[in-house]
Amino acid sequence: MGKVGIIDLGTNTFNLLIANVNGFNYEVLHKTKIAVKLGEGGIHKGFIAPEAYQRGLDALKVHKQTLLDYQIQNYYAVATSAIRSSDNGTQFVEDVKQKLGILINIIDGDKEADLIYNGVKQAVDFNGIPKLIIDIGGGSTEFIIANKSQVFWKKSYQLGAARLLELFKPKNPIELDDFNAIDSHLSNSLQDLLEMCETYEIDSLIGSSGSFDTLAEMISCRKGDCGVWKKESYFNFHMHDYNEIQRIIYASTLEERLKMKGLTPMRADMMVVSIIIINYILNNLAIHELQLSRYALKEGLLDTLIRKPQEWQKSSL
């Protein structure tokens, strides 16, 4: 099949993966992400704000040039929560098609969860037992209970970090009333998740989003070894390391977080909300193992399309 491209239009970042495919195997040639914060200023009201809209177009111009540089003939672009839930999301998709020649497929939350699982199972050993996968996006958060061979339960919630940040606007640093408001919202939204986790006796959590990448990098940098976690397809958190870094994030101001090693400026405001989501799960379940999967939606989509080559879109860039 040769070289192919995957574009993942998330709420926080627009991601590009270019790989060389040989049979059912692939080698990653290029991987990059551009911060767009598509949900900023409008996600909780159901639209993409003008500034965010333009950031999205600008990011795709850059990704298009990279596809051209690599002479990509087959590509696939998917859009997730911010675009599918916004009143002007379909207009954005049409603008991209007209201005850049990129065809975007808007996928629903169930499909997003399927692709995330398909990526995670390439990276993490499930040891034959059901585990809980969590992918904290900007607009939505996907939860999947699965083992290596099958998905037992999945659901996408409108509980993305950017969405909650826009909705609750916590103080800086976060105060107890802000925390309680977000935690109560999670409790009202996630009772069915907790029930399913009890049914499947979940004690292991796999994170597959940028928030978990950030935590792994911050922990590695604090130990003087930035980037070491990228050597493998997964990363095992020690709970005392996680607890230390989450306390630091909770207690810090935005200005302090902007100076922290391993914490990208784009995520400095959202990490507090991401920590609240993660801690809600840890505090309500008997979790003994916390892991990061470096593979998620992009890798899952790539694997799916390798096995269904008729679904690739021919490039007209």
Image (cartoon, grey):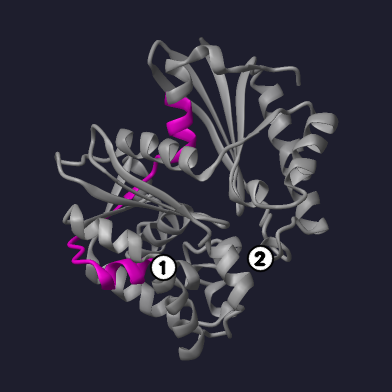
Q: Residue at x 18, y 66 (%)?
A: 286
Q: Is residue 58 left or right of residue 299?
A: right
Q: Where is mark 2, residue-wise?
A: 44
| Residue at x 57%, y 57% (from the top left corner) | 139
Q: Which residue is mark 1?
A: 277
Is 16 positioned to the left or the right of 295 in the image? right
In the figure, residue 245 lies in which quadrant? bottom left
On-image quarter of the C terminus: top right
Instruction: Examine the rendering and report whether any part of residue 9 can be seen.
Output: yes
Residue 142 is a magenta residue = no
- Residue 141 position, x and y percent, is 47, 56
Closer to the camera, 309 or 66?
A: 309
Q: Residue at x 70, y 59 (%)?
A: 46
Observer-nearest residue: 133 or 197? 197
Residue 171 image offset from top left, x and y in percent: 58, 85
Judge the density around disc 1: few (<14), some (14-19), many (≥20) Cα neighbours within 10 Å.
many
What is the spatial separation of the Cα atoms under label 2 and label 1, in whole angstroms?
Answer: 18 Å
- 285 horizontally vs 144: left or right: left
> The residue under label 1 is which amino acid type?
Ile
Residue 285 in magenta? yes
* Residue interval drawn in magenta: 276-303
Helix, strand or loop under label 1: helix
Would you say residue 175 is visible in this rendering? no
Residue at x 31%, y 41% (from the top left corner): 232
